[in-house]
Structures are given as C-alpha cells and as structure tokens.
Image: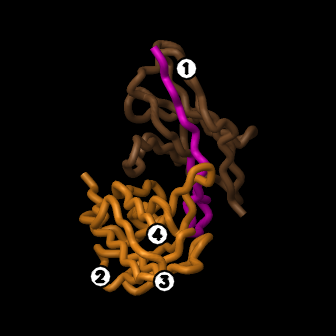
Chain colours: A orange, B brown
Amino acid sequence: DVKVTQSSRYLVKRTGEKVFLECVQDMDHENMFWYRQDPGLGLRLIYFSYDVKMKEKGDIPEGYSVSREKKERFSLILESASTNQTSMYLCASSSPWGQGNTEAFFGQGTRLTVV
Amino acid sequence: AQSVAQPEDQVNVAEGNPLTVKCTYSVSGNPYLFWYVQYPNRGLQFLLKYITGDNLVKGSYGFEAEFNKSQTSFHLKKPSALVSDSALYFCAVRPTGGGNKLTFGTGTQLKVEL
C-alpha cells in the first residue's frame, strides 16, 4: 500500500515563527502536493511538485514556500506564520499525470494552530 | 478554469436507505473524476475514479458513481447506507488533456442515522 506520512498530526506555533511541515512518501511517486483544508472551502492547492527541485504554484501560494530536495520528501514552509494560516494541511502524492490512470494518495493531515 | 460543485453541505439518510451525494464539474475536454472520503481528523481516502469506459464505476465499501457527460455530473451512490458511512465526501476533477491541477469540491457531510 502507498504510504504518505506527515511528520506531525498537531502543531501549535506562534505568530512570526518559521514553520516546517514535512511529508514523506514511499511509492517513488513523481508528483507531490500540499493542500490546505478549511470548512466550507474544501481543499485548496498550495504547491505542486512534479520532480525533484521542480515546483508549481497552486491556487493559494502566498505566505508559503516548498522544498523538494529528494524524490520522497516534500516540505511546506511557512516563512512567518500568521493566524490566518491556522488550518488542516494535507500532503498527497501520485504517479505522473501523463500516465493517466492514477489517483492521488493522501497523508493523515497536520492540524496547525498559529497563536 | 476547472471547478467542482457539491451543492449540498450535508446529506441525511436513514440506515438501510439508498444515498446519493451530488457532484457536478467544469473542465476543458474530457475529465478524470474522483471521489474521496474523510473521517474526522484524518486524511482523504480514495473511493473510486472514472477514467474512461463504463459510465457506472464501482469502488470501495459498496459505493458507486455514475458519470453523465451531458449533465457534467458524477454523483456518488450506495444502495443501502450504513451508520459507518457517516463522513465527509469530496469530489475531484482533473482534465485528461494535460495540466497538473487536481481540483476538489467543498465537500458534503453525510450523516446516516439509525
């Protein structure tokens, strides 16, 4: 089974802190994603990576950056955390979209609270 | 731009009754369509997908979904609901013609009562 592991289930950080959310997948997937989930808004894509060191902005990249130095690991960075970044963060991975018949697999989520 | 609409924030069903969770989409070209389920404080679990072929797709836990191209819909169904089906359900779409974006709906909370 595909396993996508997020380093923390719950995090509490202070405003202005630099925050790292880590995600590791064990299926040699090329694609990795970071979403945030908020009630009534569904899942919104923050960043997407289709290869090591490659990334694309999603719908809401402001205030975030990402790092993908190794294929299995995709990190989301909040440069200076703010209270409006309090949310559930979901990491996902998939085979390349060009291979067509594939779905994304999700981690268990990190609930981040910024105080 | 591609989009997904889940018109119902919540669906209530009695156990044993059939359930339907609605989804409509907008995308350029032909779609790949997905349903995911989320239990409290957990990530999303894949339920089923439509790629091509038969319009009726069968997935995990007895769920199925019907792709209707003319109505641009992909409604999730189950003939007999269980209390354990109570969860948050998300529909998602990706265009077959390329692009990296998997777009989700806002989710529908399903509540199955005894």
Helix, strand or loop at mark 4: loop
Residue A90 drawn above or below residue A59: above
Query: Callout 3: few (<14), some (14-19), or many (20+) C-alpha neighbours within 10 Å?
Result: some
| Residue B43: percent from left, percent from top | 39, 51
Say if labels 4 and 1 share a chain.
no
Closer mark to the observer between disc 2 and disc 1: 1
Q: Amino acid at mark 4?
A: Val
Residue A58 image point, x, y percent: 58, 72
**Crowding near pointer 2: few (<14 within 10 Å), some, many (20+)?**
few
Of circles 3 and 4, the one toward us is 4
Amino acid tagged 3: Ser
Above or below residue A15? Residue B91 is: above
Name the front one of labels 3 and 1: 3
Have a look at marks 2 and 1 and say if they share a chain.
no
Indicate the secondary structure of the residue bearing disc 2: strand
Count neighbours of disc 4 (C-alpha within 10 A) and say few if under 14, some if 14 to 19, many if 20 or more.
Answer: some
Q: Is residue A87 above or below residue A79?
A: above
Identified at 47% across, 13% down, the residue is: B16
State how far apart marks 3 and 1 are (Cα): 44 Å
| Direction from residue B83 to residue B34 in the image, left or right | right
- Decide which of tag 3 and tag 4 comes sooner along the chain: 3
Is disc 2 in contact with disc 3, using a CB cutoff of under 8 Å?
A: no
**Is residue A7 highlighted in magenta?**
no
Q: Which residue is disc 1 drawn over?
A: B13
Task: Please check whether the numbered discs 3 and 4 fall on a single chain.
Answer: yes
Residue at 40% in and 42% down: B40
Q: Quadrant of residue B75?
A: top right
Residue visible at 62% across and 39% down? B74
Q: Is residue B39 left or right of residue B5?
A: left
